[in-house]
Amino acid sequence: MGIIIKVNQRGGVVKKKFRLYAGRNNLSLFITARKGVKPDLFYDLAEVMNMSEKSLAEIIHVSPRTISNYRESKKSLDPVQSEHLLKLVALYDKGEELFGNLTEFNYWLQKPFWNEKERPIDWLVTPGGVELIIDELTRLAYGDAV
């Protein structure tokens, strides 16, 4: 029994909320990350991910207080944190597109891999892990066993 995937062609919450960042290629993502993103992206993404600010801060390896300080001082995040956030935007964009909504995608992220204890959400702690999950979603979209 396989998973039925519905592709949302119109664009969902992620595409609308992050229209400046969603659907970008790796080069434009890199260029944007190198310049740094505003802390508001962090707060907006936490809301879209239905995740606490503390949990998202742990994923990108920064304290919630640091994010708050950046916001108060109108300072951009550093390139590494920016890249991580932008890759998470890309992941959630693809996940929402494939699963039809964020609730279903978040459910999938919590399910363990085949006969494993690890869940896809556990891999989000590095940009490379996010890319691996994006690759899994691509395989799932094409009907490959994941």
Image: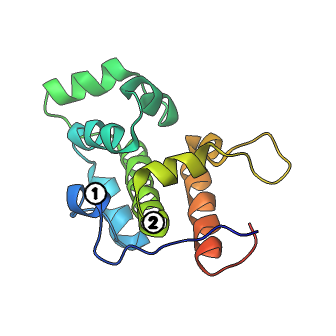
The tag earlier along the polypeptide, 2 or 1, is 1
Q: Amino acid at mark 2?
A: Lys
Q: Which residue is mark 1?
A: 13
Res 34 quadrant in image = bottom left
Outermost residue toward the front in this view: 1
Q: Which residue is mark 2?
A: 94
- As rendered, which of 11 and 127 lies closer to the eye? 11
Closer to us: mark 2 or mark 1?
1
Residue 14, given in percent of the width and then of the height, sits at 31, 57
Q: Of the numbered discs in the image, which one, if any, rests on residue 63?
A: none
- In this view, the residue farthest toward the bottom is 142
State the scheme by which the image is colored: rainbow
Query: x and y percent of residue 33 in the render?
Result: 34, 55
Secondary structure at badge 1 equals helix
The residue shown at (39%, 47%) is 85
Q: Is residue 17 above or below residue 40?
A: below
Q: Which of 144 and 24 lies nearest the eye of the viewer?
A: 144
Left or right, 22 with respect to 76, comes to right
Look at the picture and state if 65 lies above or below 44: above
**In the drawing, does residue 68 fall left or right of residue 59?**
left
Q: Is residue 9 left or right of residue 104?
A: left
User: Residue 136, relative to residue 117: is it above or below?
Assistant: below
- In the image, taking residue 117 as reference, residue 14 lies left or right, namely left
Q: Kindly state the secondary structure of the residue where label 2 is placed.
A: helix
Who's the residue at 49% across and 63% down the image? Answer: 99
Q: Position of residue 4 (x, y in %)?
A: 60, 70
In the rendered image, which quarter contains the C terminus? bottom right
